[in-house]
């Protein structure tokens, strides 16, 4: 293992790419168009004993990396690095973080109950290699270090990848950049183990990394007993947040996996959106729902002051991203509550609430 990724087996392995910017560590912000020269790709292989990751990190021709450390459990804060997050059993709330930097420094932790335990030290190895305009890394992780046996073909784990871009002092992530933090296993993507020796094998999944409430269509492909590739689709209905269990069937074999669905509503209030002159306050609302769910949805927005006075507004069949404005002229100054509820008929599906000061226009975190 030399970190170069020059072998054909790495070149032929499918790559996870399309990382999304998370902004800086100080000012997180999702930006879908990351600079081309700073792309990241991750590939994965396995054998009977280990899981391997190959990482290729494009960088400026003369990358200006911040001070890097070699060794184990080094401080990666604001330094160039790649972080791999694995969970063989996401339903148990247990996962692992493995990170490397261009100097060969390592950091690992166990993810449990949505937090990181840096006291965990796994028996895994890594190698890195620098080159023109990029650096590459290989990671070899024994299955026993993760407390599991070698998975069978068709097994699906939860996985995510993070890139710390030192030259930009920023981060990008493969799955779900709007997640609260990377210790939330529900927001990870899928890692599918494919065994070419299987008579019938699931070879790919095409599903949303973040499922929407309503109907989601999951595409999948499998190799049948004759060696031919076949495809199928599965309609998955989502009416709650969390892990949604799914099953794909291929010639009598059943393959189980899960989709991650976040909360239905995401409400954002910003200082710049509090308009004092026209006596209006506005909020940005994202509704994580598929078209069939949105059509029957009614949003009820309410602004309540400290005296209990309120103004309300209803919206039917909303778009996925909307701005809601409410008048504040009749409300008293001070801290108010901006609340949005999502209803279909008499069923409440979701509620989001934020507090802010009408005069200052700041969120009192």
Image (cartoon, rainbow, N blue to C red):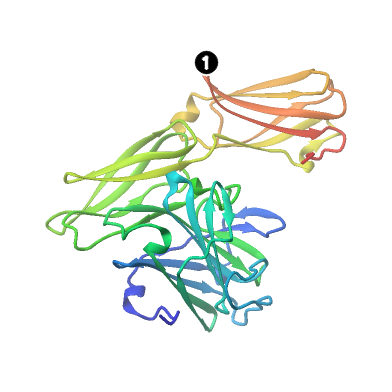
Q: Residue furthest top?
A: 346
Classify residue 342 by image quadrant: top right
Quadrant, the C terminus: top right
Q: Mark 1: which secondary structure?
A: loop
Instruction: Please give the name of the residue rendered at 50% of the width and 48% of the height, measured from the top-left corner.
Output: 187
Q: Position of residue 322 (x, y in %)?
A: 62, 35
Q: Residue furthest left?
A: 226
Residue 24 lies left or right of residue 119; in this view the side is: right
Q: Position of residue 166 (x, y in %)?
A: 65, 71
Quadrant, the N terminus: bottom left
Number of marks in picture = 1
Viewer can see residue 357: yes
- Label 1 CA crowd tier, 10 Å (few <14, some 14–19, many 20+): few
Instruction: Please give the name of the residue rendered at 82% of the width and 30% of the height, measured from the top-left corner.
Output: 335
Residue 363 lies left or right of residue 169; in this view the side is: right
Q: Nearer the viewer, residue 358 or 263?
A: 263
Name the residue that disc number 1 marks: 346
Residue 336 lies left or right of residue 105; in this view the side is: right
Instruction: Please give the name of the residue rendered at 82% of the width and 38% of the height, measured from the top-left corner.
Output: 361
């Amino acid at each position: 293992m030399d970190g170069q990724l020059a072998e054909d087996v790495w070149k032929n392995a499918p790559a996870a790419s399309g990382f999304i910017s998370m902004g800086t560590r100080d000012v997180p912000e999702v930006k879908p168009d990351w600079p081309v020269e700073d792309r990241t790709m991750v590939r994965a292989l396995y054998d009977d004993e280990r899981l391997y990751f190959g990482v290729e990190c494009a960088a400026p021709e003369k990358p200006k990396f911040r001070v890097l450390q070699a060794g184990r459990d080094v401080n990666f804060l604001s330094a160039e690095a790649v972080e791999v997050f694995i969970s063989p059993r996401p339903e148990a709330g247990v996962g692992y973080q493995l990170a490397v930097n261009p100097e060969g420094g390592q950091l690992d932790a166990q993810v449990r109950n949505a937090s990181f335990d840096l006291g965990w030290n796994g028996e895994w190895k890594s190698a890195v290699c620098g080159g023109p305009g990029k650096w590459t890394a290989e990671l070899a992780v024994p299955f026993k270090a993760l407390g599991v046996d070698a998975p069978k073909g068709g097994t699906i784990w939860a996985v995510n990848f993070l890139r710390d871009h030192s030259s930009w002092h920023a981060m990008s992530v493969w799955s779900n950049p709007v997640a609260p933090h990377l210790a939330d296993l529900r927001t990870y993507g899928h890692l599918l183990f494919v065994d070419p020796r299987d008579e019938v094998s699931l070879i790919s999944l095409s599903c949303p990394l973040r499922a929407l409430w309503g109907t989601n269509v999951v595409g999948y492909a499998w190799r049948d007993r004759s060696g031919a590739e076949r495809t199928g689709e599965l309609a998955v209905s989502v009416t709650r947040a969390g892990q949604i269990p799914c099953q794909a069937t291929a010639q009598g074999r059943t393959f189980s996996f899960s989709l991650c669905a976040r909360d239905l509503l995401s409400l954002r209030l910003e200082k710049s959106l509090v308009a004092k002159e026209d006596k209006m306050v506005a909020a940005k609302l994202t509704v994580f729902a598929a078209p069939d769910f949105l059509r029957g949805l009614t949003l009820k927005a309410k602004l309540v002051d400290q005296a209990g006075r309120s103004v309300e507004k209803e919206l039917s069949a909303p778009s996925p991203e909307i701005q809601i404005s409410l008048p504040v002229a009749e409300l008293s100054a001070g801290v108010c509550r901006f609340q949005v509820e999502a209803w279909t008929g008499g069923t409440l599906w979701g509620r989001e609430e934020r507090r802010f000061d009408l005069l200052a226009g700041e969120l009192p975190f």
